[in-house]
Amino acid sequence: MLAGGKSSRMGQDKGLMPLRGKPLAGYVLDALKPCFEHIAIVTDNPAYRVFGFEAIPDALKNLGPAGGIYTALRHSTVGLNLVVSCDMPFITPKLVQWLVSEALLSNAEITLPKTEKGFEPLFAVYSQAVLPQLAQLLDGGMVKLQNIVSCFNYKALPAPPGPALSNLNTPHHFETAQQYITQQMSITILAFGQTAEATGAPQFAIDETVKDTNHLKALLEQRFPALANMQYALALNTGLVTQNTPINPPATVALLPPFSGG
């Protein structure tokens, strides 16, 4: 994981900025941990050691991400290496496995997604074989990754949809990501009849971490004591819940009181 940028547009080390209570880099590392035995962080900031992984200082200073990739490959002892930036919180283990699988099926020196804007070189698999030529390119002053990738045998993949590969470079990007994650982690509550009277609204959202329907019911009855003295059923994503059931946000839960007359 590359965490050596200056974060000039963010105004502080963005990888350590809290995003819903967790450092931004923590989201990336959580996506990598199920997939790899060895993870290292390329950074000159010793604060990244808090994550428990090896921190590698940049071998070539002031060359931006290209220098970070060079450092990672020079340090590595394996043939293929996934390189990812610390500011991509929507990377998932499934996405990582997809990219690595594509790289293993190819003889390309670089395997990476490509969008209408160009290559995604900060979520890419690099062969260690690129190291000698990469060193020459950097020595010759070429540091723009779009140009560097074009110098190698690469495999371009269609980029995944949505915000999967979004980089958070500015405070606006960060706030947008915060709102998106909040929305994705929320549970929408739909209340009907007596339950709507007890909660004071026919629809609202729960942003707390909720494990299952029992946990949710206890949380709701603590927040709205009138519910505790009421008979009602739960429907999770349109399906009636008859036993304790895990909840995976985003989700919709309906509070269903008995129908009039029974």
Image (cartoon, rainbow, N blue to C red):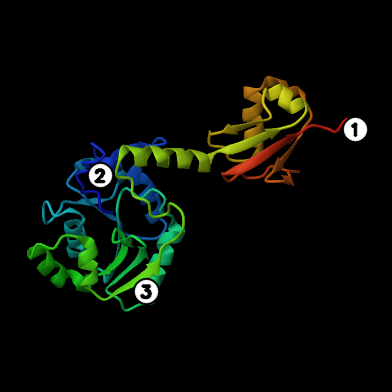
Please give the count of numbered marks on the rendered protein: 3
Q: Does dot 2 land on a helix, a strand or a loop?
A: helix
Q: CA distance from mark 1 to mark 2?
A: 61 Å
Viewed as shown, does residue 165 lie left or right of 121? Answer: right
Tell me if mark 1 has few (under 14), some (14-19) or many (20+) residues whose alpha carbon lies within 10 angstroms of its own. Answer: few
Of tags 1 and 2, which is closer to the observer? 1
Q: Is residue 224 above or below residue 30?
A: above
Tell me where residue 176 appears, x and y as whole percent: 41, 40
Disc 2 marks which amino acid? Arg
Numbered badge on residue 152: none
Residue 137 visible? The answer is yes
Tell me where residue 29 appears, x and y as whole percent: 36, 50
Q: Which residue appears at 28% of the width and 61% of the height?
A: 121
Q: Which residue is mark 2?
A: 49
Camera-side residue of 75 and 18: 18
Numbered badge on residue 104: 3
Q: CA distance from mark 3 to mark 2?
A: 30 Å
Could you tell which of marks 1 and 2 lies nearer the N-terminus? 2
Q: Residue most toward the right?
A: 261
Q: Which residue appears at 24% of the width and 49% of the height?
A: 3
Q: Which residue appears at 39% of the width and 69% of the height?
A: 157
Q: Which residue is mark 1?
A: 262
Disc 1 marks which amino acid? Gly
The C terminus, quarter of image:
top right
Of tags 3 and 2, which is closer to the observer? 3
Could you tell which of marks 1 and 3 lies nearer the N-terminus? 3
Viewed as shown, does residue 83 lie left or right of 142? Answer: right
Q: Which residue appears at 21% of the width and 55% of the height?
A: 65
Q: Residue most toward the top?
A: 225
Could you tell which of marks 3 and 2 lies nearer the N-terminus? 2
Tell me where residue 106 appears, x and y as whole percent: 35, 77
The N terminus, quarter of image:
bottom left
